[in-house]
Amino acid sequence: MKWTDVRLIAIELAEAHPEIDPKTVRFTDLHNWVLELEDFDDDHMHGGEKVLEAIQMTWIDEME
């Protein structure tokens, strides 16, 4: 899984952290959680603010 797999990352995060409201997640935590996903294999430096925002917004959509 790469940073460009926004929807897949959001789904994995929703499954890994069902008790979390994605609207309240700080980008530093979000970045770390993505890196901790079992299937994630990409350069940690490519997870910039725009990518993290896209992941967060997709996660929010997945929860609704």
Image (cartoon, rainbow, N blue to C red):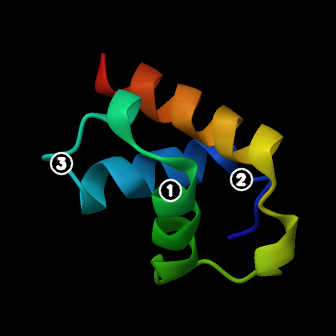
Residue at disc 2, secondary structure: loop
| Vertical relation: 25 (above or below) 63 | below
- Label 3 sits on what residue type? Pro
Contact flag, marks 3 and 1 (Cβ < 8 Å): no
The residue carrying mark 2 is: 5
| Quadrant of the image containing the N terminus | bottom right
Cβ atoms under marks 3 and 2 closer than 8 Å: no
Label 3: state its secondary structure.
loop
The Cα atoms of the two marked residues, 1 and 2, are separated by: 15 Å
Q: Residue at x 22, y 44 (%)?
A: 20
Residue 48 location, x and y as percent?
Answer: 81, 54
Q: Mark 3 and mark 1: span between their CA atoms? A: 14 Å
Of 20 and 5, nearer the camera is: 20
Marks 1 and 2, the one that precedes in the sequence: 2
Q: Quadrant of the C terminus?
A: top left
Q: Is residue 45 above or below residue 23?
A: below
Disc 3 designates what residue? Answer: 18
Sequence-earlier tag: 3 or 1:
3
The kind of residue tagged 1 is Leu
